[in-house]
Structure formats: C-alpha cells, structure tokens
Amino acid sequence: MRYLMSIMSSPEIEAVHYEPGPEVFEAMAAYNEEMVKAGVLLAGDGLAPASEATRVTFSNGRANVTDGPFAEAKEFIAGYWVIQVSSHAEAVEWAKRCPHPPEGDDTETHLVLRRILDTDDFGDEMPEHLKERERELRAEGYAHGS
C-alpha cells in the first residue's frame, strides 16, 4: 500500500516567511533517513510557498489560471512523502513519528495521510485495457521522472 503524507502550512505561517532553524532540518533528515533504512520511503520533498503556486480551475470546458497566493485557502501543502507500507496502521505509525513542534510550542501542525489508489482499486469501472496501459506507463514512463 502506498500513502501520501502531506505536511500542511497556513497563509499565516507563510506570511511571516517562516524559516525553520537547523534543528528542524536535522530532525527531518533523521526522520527521512529512518524511513529510507526501513525501506518505506519512495519520494519526498518540501514545496515552495503558495505565493509561487498557480491554480488551474476547469469549468464549462475552459481552463482558468490564477497565480498565488490564494487568499481564500486555509491550508497549503508545505511538503510531502510517498511511503510504501503493509497497512494503514503502519502508515499512521510513520506519520506519528514525523518531527513536530516540541511541547510548549503552541504552533499547530497538521499532517494529512491519504492512501494512493492503484489501478485495481477502481474495480470493473475501469476497463482492463486501460488498467494495463496505466501499469505500462508507470513501469516505463513517469516512474523514471523522479
């Protein structure tokens, strides 16, 4: 089972140009190394602030482009990990190990954990020839992009 773990940020945090100290980078590096050694980490990166983001909205057959920041947004994805584990419970255990603000720091940090669907999760609604095509694309194409 693959899971996407997204560490969230907020417009308030991004507005003050929060820059973590060396201890945060050390904690994240240790966490990432632990996941690599356990063989569960497939990918992970931090993301540029929402002020550098672009939103593409599809409506009525058209694509509309809006550059960030997005005033109506309450949360942004600040970084992510893709992990491969044997169960949801194991994914939750890895999520709980993520470095977070220490006791006494009232900053609230959210991590969202979502299972990544495989082609077989779509059942009979997805035709078998399209499932096979998707498997081939993953094997030869976009799996090599990282």
Image: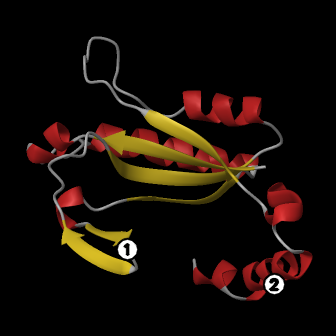
Residue at numbered disc 1: 60
**Dot 1 amino acid type:** Asn
Would you say 139 lies left or right of 78 here? right
Q: Dividing the image into 4 quarters, which one contains the C terminus?
A: bottom right
Q: Give the residue displayed 88% in from the left and 82% down from the top.
A: 129
- Residue situated in front as seen by the camera: 72 or 101: 72
* Number of numbered discs visible in the structure rendering: 2
Q: Earlier in the sequence, mark 1 or mark 2?
A: 1
Mark toward the viewer: 1 or 2: 1
- Give the label on residue 73, or none: none
Q: Is residue 109 above or below residue 67?
A: above
Left or right position of 103 against 130: left
Residue that numbered label 2 is attached to: 133
**Position of 84 relative to 74 (above/below):** below
Most extreme residue toward the top, as rendered? 104
Q: Is residue 140 above or below residue 81?
A: below
Is residue 52 left or right of 55 when viewed as pictured? left
Residue 52: name its quadrant.
bottom left
Question: What residue is at 30 percent from the left and 42 percent from the top?
Answer: 75
Q: What residue sits 55% from the left and 52% below the top?
A: 81
The kind of secondary structure element at disc 2 is helix
Q: Position of residue 43 (x, y in %)?
A: 58, 61
Provide residue 46's location: percent of width, then percent of height.
38, 57
Identify the residue at horizontal 48%, vertical 46% (top origin): 6
Q: Amino acid at mark 2?
A: Arg
Residue 71 visible to an observer of this rendering: yes
SS type, badge 1: loop
